Each structure stands twice: as structure tokens, then as C-alpha cells.
Image (spheres, rainbow, N blue to C red):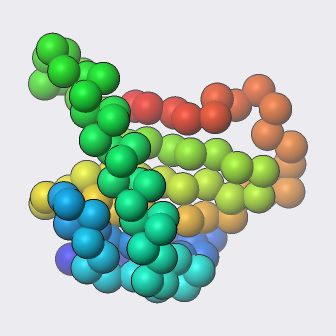
Amino acid sequence: MLNLERIPDQVGYLVLTEDGAVVASGGELENDEHLATNITELVYTSEVLEQGSSPENKFQKITVVYDDYTLGICLSNKRIHVVKRRTPNQQVTDAPLVDMN
């Protein structure tokens, strides 16, 4: 399993199964079942939107940007990995709200 605690500026993390069950968690996201449910729905919604796309066009990560933190979401080894990171003290005005790469 990835050591998510070593990510710079990380203040919390979740590791979820494909159905949204929390496998590991820490920091501000420790045992956050509500967020786990919302993240799982976001991932499944993005997969539905990508149906019919070629495998090369599948998302690699989803970044949800808030004023003071971001949520980085990626899939690996049939797990959903979520990291909450602080953002620099700058105003995010031109950035997209959701970045799907």
C-alpha cells in the first residue's frame, strides 16, 4: 500500500475499496464515511461519462479545488486513493473547479 502520509502538505487521506468502504485513513479525513461515499459517487459518475471512450482517454486523477485545500483522487490496485492537501495562500480564481485528467 502507498504511504500517503509522506505526501508534502498532506493533512488527511483515505483509501477506499471500489464500493466505497474505508480501508485506511488518517489526519483530517480519518474515518470520514460521508466523504468516502461522495468520492465514490464522483468516481463512478466520471466513469459513466467516459463510457465509449478509448482506454487511453480514461481519467488518471481527479482534483477537486477549494479555497484552502484540494482533494486529489486516483485509482490504483482496485482502490480509490484520496489525499487532502493544503493550498498556498493564494486566491484560486482562474482554476477549474474539477480537473479531470
Residue 47, percent across and down? 25, 33
| Location of residue 98 by image quarter | top right
Q: Is residue 29 left or right of residue 14?
A: right
Q: Is residue 50 visible?
A: yes
Q: Is residue 23 left or right of residue 66?
A: left
Indicate whether 45 appears above or below 90. Answer: above
Q: Is residue 2 visible?
A: no
Residue found 54% across the figure and 56% down from its top: 71
Indicate whether 44 appears above or below 66. Answer: above
Q: Is residue 11 left or right of residue 68?
A: left
Indicate whether 52 appears above or below 70. Answer: above
Residue found 48% across the figure and 64% down from its top: 35
Which of the image's four quarters has the C terminus?
Answer: top left
How many marks the image carries: the answer is: 0
Residue 42, percent across and down? 40, 44
Residue found 78% across the figure and 51% down from its top: 67
Residue found 27% across the figure and 64% down from its top: 20
Indicate whether 19 appears above or below 75. Answer: below
Q: Is residue 9 left or right of residue 80?
A: right
Residue 22, percent across and down? 30, 76
| Location of residue 16 by image quarter | bottom left
Residue 31, percent across and down? 43, 83
Which of the image's four quarters has the N terminus?
Answer: bottom left
In the image, 40 versus 88, the foreground residue is 40
